[in-house]
Each structure stands twice: as C-alpha cells, then as structure tokens.
Amino acid sequence: MSAPLPAPLRPCLALFTVLAFVLTAFSAPAAARHAIAMHGEPLYPENFTHFSYANPDAPNGGSITYGATGSFDSFNPFIVRGTSAIGLREHVFESLLARGYDEAFTLYALLAEKVEVPDDRSWISFTLNPAARFSDGKPVTVEDVIYSLETLRDKGRPNFKTYYSKVERIERPGPRTVKFVFADDGDREIPLILGLMPIIPKHVYEKRDFDRSGFEMPVGSGPYIVGNFTPGARIVYRRDENYWGAGLPVNAGHYNIDRITYEYFRDANASFEAFKAGVYHARAEDDPGRWTNSYGFPAMRQGKVRKEIFKSGMPSGMRALVFNTRKPVLAEKNVRLALIRIFNFDWVNRNLYHGLYVRTQSFFDNSELGSHGRPAGDRERALLAPFPGVVSSEIMEHGWHAPAGDPTGQDRENRAVAIALLREAGYELRNGAMTEIATGRPLKLEILVATPDDERLALTYATMTRRIGIDIVVRNVDPSQYQERRSNYDFELMFNGWFSSLSPGNEQTFYWGSEAADAPGTRNYMGAREPAIDAMIEAMLEARAHEDFVAAVRALDRVLLSGAYMIPLFHQPDQWLALWNKVKVPEKISLYGYRSGTWWIEE
C-alpha cells in the first residue's frame, strides 16, 4: 500500500482530481451519428426512410434527355484543365455524406455510415459503410478516402487545395474509419466540407495522369456509369444495376431513370428548337421573352409539353457584370461607380425581359442573410469596427439600393451623376469622348461574352455608356476561349453568376478571398483583395450561434456591395421549367427548389 500523501499536498491532489474530471468530460469521444448539421440539429432522425421531397414509390425505368450548350473535352470534373462533361459529379462520383435539401446545410450517411465530430469541430471521423462499392465492384476503403483528399488537394481545382489543406493530420482509428484533424483556425464548416469530398478509387486513378484532361473512362461509386458518348456532342449515363447504395434512405426515390443523356447544342436558340421537337425533355428556362412568347409550339398546344413554376426558399444569388479590378482603368473605384450608375435596369427589364425580372440588390437577396433594406445591427457593427470606412454609411444604414432607372430610356439624372464621378476620377468629356485628363486617352473598355443573350445585354449597355462618351466593345468568343480567358482573368468586363445558399461558407473564400485573387481558376473574377472580406468570411466560418452567423454574412454582403466590384443585374422571382409529359415530378419540392434526381418517367 502506498504511503499517505503529506498534508500540504492534499489540496493539490483535490485540484488535480477536479481538473482531471473536467478534462475527461471535455475530451470524451463524440457520439457516432447518422448526420451532421452546420447549425442546430438534423431535421431527419436516424431511422428516417426518405427525404420529404422524394417519392419512394416512384417507378424505375425509362430514359430522359437534357440539353446543354457548348461542348466538352474531359471526363475529369475535378481539375482546371479542359471542359468537363455535364453530370459526372452528380451521377458517377459520390461523397462520404449526402446533402439534405430540406435544410440549410445538413449531411446524412452515404459512403460513410457514421460520422463523429466533437463540439469544437477540431476533427471529424467517418466510418465507411461496409457495403460501399465502386462501379467495378471493388470496395470503398480508407485508403481511397485518403488518396482522394491528397490527390484533389495537390492536383485538383484551387478550391480543393483551399479546403483540404486545413487537414493537419490523418489517423486510422479502425479498419473502416478515417479521422481528419484540422488546423486550429476556428473553421466550423470544414468538417462538413470533408463530408462532401468526392471519393475516387485509388486503384484506378493512381495509374492515370490525374491533372490531364481527356476521355479515360471515369470510375466512381455513384448510381450511374458512363455508357456511350460523342466527344463534345453527347454523353449517356446508364443506371448501374449493381449500385451498392440503392437501398439507403438518402437515395429512396432518387435515380429512378435508367438512361440519362445530355445533348450539346451550339447555342440557346438551337437548343430551344431541339426541345420543341422533342430531342430533349426538360428545359429550365431563363429567358423571360421566350417564356412569355415562345411556348405556343405544336407539342405545347397538343398537351404534350407543360410549363411549371416552382418557388424556391433560396437566396437569389448574384448575376452581375463583373469589373476586373486587376486592370488599371478599373482599379479606380469612381470609374466603377459611374459604370454602375449608368446601367438602366428599368428600361432593360421593360424592353428586353417583359418586366419579369427583379433587380438584385444583395448577394443574398430574398433571405434573412441579405443586407438590403436592413440597418446594420450591433453584431455587424462590432465585426466591421476594425475596418472603418470600408462600408459606406448608406450601405451601413440600409444596404445597397440600386439607382432608380428611367423606363423611357432618358435617365438624365444618372448620367449626370456618372459624369461627376468620372470627373473626380480624372476624366472629362472632349469632343464627345470621355478622356483621361492626365494622358489624353479615351475611356474604352471591352465586355467578353460567349452567348447571344449576354451579347444582346452587353450591346444594350454599350449604347447607354456611349451617351456619356465611354466606348465599350463587345467581344464574342467561342466557349473554350471564353473559359480560358475567364480562368486566367484575361478580360475587362464579363458576365458571371454566383450561386447562394442558406449556409454560405468556405466557397466564399474561393469567390472573394484575397488568396484567390491571383490563383488561376478561382471565382474571384473581380480580383478583390480586401482584408475586411477575409475577416467577415472568417467570422462566418467561426460562428456557433445562428445570430452570429447571420450577422457575419450580412456584414460580408455590405463589404462586397461597398466595394463596387460589379454591376448587380437581376434575377427570376421563381424557377421556370418546361417538361415533356413523360417526365414526372414529386408533389413537394425541396427548400432548394426542384431536384431532377427525384424525377421519374411514365411513357
């Protein structure tokens, strides 16, 4: 028996005992669960049978064809090089967890049957489903998961490197379990990002040159495999009869169609003519003029085609004419503000789009995350306090308000304001041309486009700018050249859209972060290098409470809008969809809108 502890040391023993208890409590293993939510608890319990927006009784079989524009030259959707065929990520490759589209951001068991994460989210572990198989019959292993992370991080798109470089250490607690330990940067979203990591088979891709585009047959664990294809013109996916995950709750009512084809067309007009003729069967419409006037074709009149309107609970996203601030002429903020001021949405909407569009006034319009029409609250002001002057007083008080345009097209007031802003930037009108005073050079810009719709809008805008002496040239290039120039930021102005969700996170770094400004292939097309943007994204990723998260997103919104990086354009208030009648859709749609993976065919 040990000797009793001397009396002076007994209080220390008591203290050590208490500390040991506390440390044990806080370091206790996290419970293995079927799901993980970004904030709060998952909507669906462990014994759920299907998502509410899927029909578990939907019949299997049949075929569907979708339309696409442009072309493709690659079967690798994970690299910058080449243009990947549509559908590969959705149909062929799976993630460890599957997203539930009834919620802002919650993931459920897929390749991983269980997920564990501690409260501080300093690590996450995944236990693989023993039934998980790739399409060649080989099991999905921990080695495949680790290989996927390392390969995508080192050779994949820049966003993969940004996300997966946050993994500091990889452990293997068991034969089917892998644990990722993260760097201590407070990013609470990164565990979920790992859950969405696509898993590729090591035994296949380690024998290939992963960062080379081409038509080597893709191998994944998803519900479809590539059937036949015509390079650049057509790709066919065939439902895998041996798909391992057909019985999972997340897949109930999904992947009902046996054969999925994507037909490529040279432009939107050729695509629409093909839809009218029944070459393909589902068309998401984004042209108000076409939606209003062009659906009286014979198949529609005969009841073979129907139009449906869906309301989404998602933010509108941002569709904009983007300024490349890497270019000296656009580095001057007052020049950008003048270009924003001169865009007459009211005239454009009435004359080009039948008045069906709504002006976009926030990166998160139509949701609680947007700053439009809202004064900054105390949480936002505290976040923005270290960056005085970055957010304008107007945007701090009520968000960004687009200049009111003139539907008649006169718009004299906005032109006067634009000219005054250009004067402050060192320009003046000389013989009808807006001219830089210091150099005598006229203000001339180029808008890069690749579609007829964008070209029409760009030409309309160019007419508006000429009224104040700015010469804009519209350059229409083929899709491959457009993609190359966009990826390398070889443009002055161009159109782009950014999707927004109810749970923005790490992708915002890829969109607007300073580190993304100089890396080719990111979506920071404007070249933003603003410390306040980086800080707001960091605050968003660190937020634990929903209120703190909303405040950080709204603050980010205000910083982006104050930066005048683009001309916010407009958005559809609803989702417009035209379907041939053999395509059936569940009665209930998801929070994100319709999901084509839940459709089925009745011939």
Image: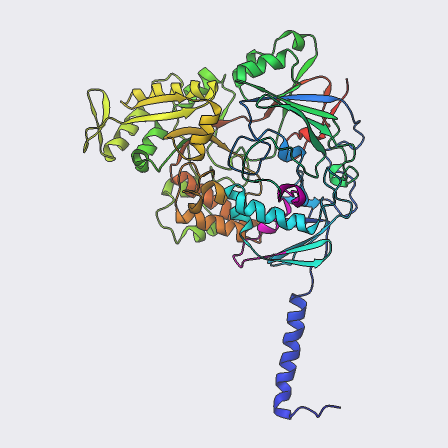
Which portion, as a residue range, is magenta?
A: 180-206
- If the image is split into quadrants, where does the N terminus sit? bottom right
Quarter assignment of residue 423: top left
Residue at coordinates 35% horizontally, 38% vertically from top-left? 326
Q: Is residue 540 magenta?
A: no
Q: Is residue 183 magenta?
A: yes
Give 152 or 99, whichever is nearer the viewer: 152
Residue 170 position, x and y percent, is 62, 57
Residue at coordinates 47% horizontally, 36% vertically from top-left? 362
Residue 522 position, x and y percent, is 47, 39
- When the figure is inspected, residue 146 is found, relative to residue 512, above or below; the finding is below
Residue at coordinates 39% horizontally, 46% vertically from top-left? 530
Horizontally, residue 520 falls left or right of residue 140, namely left
What count of labels does the image hold? 0
Q: Is residue 226 among the parts visible in the rendering?
A: yes
Q: Is residue 588 among the parts visible in the rendering?
A: no
- When the figure is inspected, residue 276 is found, relative to residue 391, above or below; the finding is above
- When the figure is inspected, residue 574 is found, relative to residue 131, above or below; the finding is above
Give 503 or 444, whichever is nearer the viewer: 444
